[in-house]
Amino acid sequence: MPEPGAPRRTPQGVPYADLQHIVNADGQHLFCRYWEPEGPPRALVFVAHGAGEHCGPYDEIGQTLKEQSLLVFAHDHVGHGQSEGDRMNIKDFQVFVRDSLQHIDLMKGRHPDLPIFIIGHSMGGAISILTACERPNDFAGVALIAPMVKMNPESATPFKVFLAKVLNHMVPSLSLGSIDSKWISRDQKQVEAYDNDELNHHGGLRVSFGMQLMGAVARIEREVPAITWPFLLLHGDDDKLCDIRGSQMMFDMAQSTDKKIKVYEGAYHVLHHELPETVAAVLKEVTGWISERLAVSPSQGS
Ligand SMILES: O=C1CC[C@@H](CCC(=O)N2CCC(COc3ccc(F)cc3Cl)CC2)N1
């Protein structure tokens, strides 16, 4: 433990005093990124990253939306990237949702009249869904990139789920193995970038973390039929990490009148880091979907 007066530093040793950050309800420092347009922003967009990664890889999305006069903001979730917390370990999945709402409320306080969107990828998609479920009338739209709505049946067979539950009581820190990076993208350059990114956590996924993920998936399954807010679902049909059937189930079951699903043929998990033509299509889809909802969204408050 650092001595009491020492400045709090990121896991990589950088003083938080030198970085954009927020402090969550447990006193943990979360590293933040902001993409602020030159002129007055038209809307706020919160980005929720996935398991084992951080918000740096969303720079292209952030820059693209910033050029559309959107104010994009994100943070590294607890236990990820440049934020504090034991790597990919969380006492309760709700901490990710609570911290997201804290950052969203901070930004809404600074821009009270702006509509707000969320973009979530994979585990960040699950965080986004649960965040919107807690504030069903607050968001102009939620864009979900290969969200974790259902576990991949190959990797989470009933036997493995049973085993995880048993192991969680005996060896919660046991590793279930790490994410196989070959399923990240068909673009080998993107797979190498993921493998070489030292801010990603390449250690295994603990049983206890897996249990939290399973709990989140179960909670989402219960919440989906009551969803009424606008959402966009983007999923690759060769995704081996998050089952596309989860997105299909959410699209079919949610009550929302404003919902859209787009399937990317042959694409793997990380659509925003897929082959160039897929990335371009995804960025165009997300920016277009948000712009459509800005043209007609009722102004907040007035
Ligand atoms: O750019 C990038 C780099 C990383 C990737 C995001 C990864 C991400 O968030 N995933 C994919 C893996 C998935 C594993 O799921 C489980 C595992 C065990 C278990 F017991 C229960 C579950 Cl549900 C959780 C969600 N995107």
Image (cartoon, grey):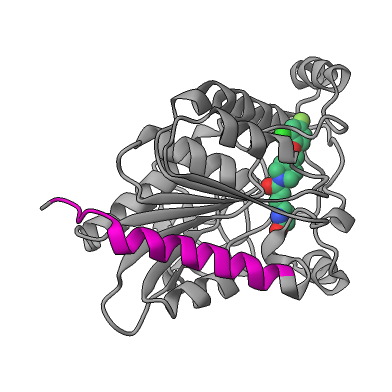
Q: Name the one closer to the observer, 283 or 257.
A: 257
Q: Is residue 299 magenta?
A: yes
The residue depicted at 87 percent of the width and 41 percent of the height is 177
The answer to whether residue 115 is seen in the rendering is: yes
**Main secondary structure type of the part rendered in magenta:** helix
**Residue 81 percent coordinates (x, y):** 63, 59
Task: Give the image quadrant in which the ligand numbered 1 is located.
Answer: top right
Q: Name the one closer to the observer, 62 or 171.
A: 62
The answer to whether residue 21 is seen in the rendering is: no
**Residue 103 percent coordinates (x, y):** 38, 53
Left or right of 136 in this view: 57? right
**Residue 198 percent coordinates (x, y):** 74, 66
Report the span colored magenta. Answer: 278-301
Q: Is residue 63 magenta?
A: no
Location of residue 24 with respect to 271 vertically, above or below? above
Residue 109 occupies quadrant:
bottom left
**Residue 232 percent coordinates (x, y):** 53, 50
Q: Name the one closer to the observer, 81 or 27.
A: 81
Numbered marks: total:
0
The residue depicted at 72 percent of the width and 58 percent of the height is 270
Left or right of 17 in this view: 274? right
Q: Name the one closer to the observer, 154 or 176.
A: 154
Left or right of 71 in this view: 196? right
The residue depicted at 59 percent of the width and 54 percent of the height is 49
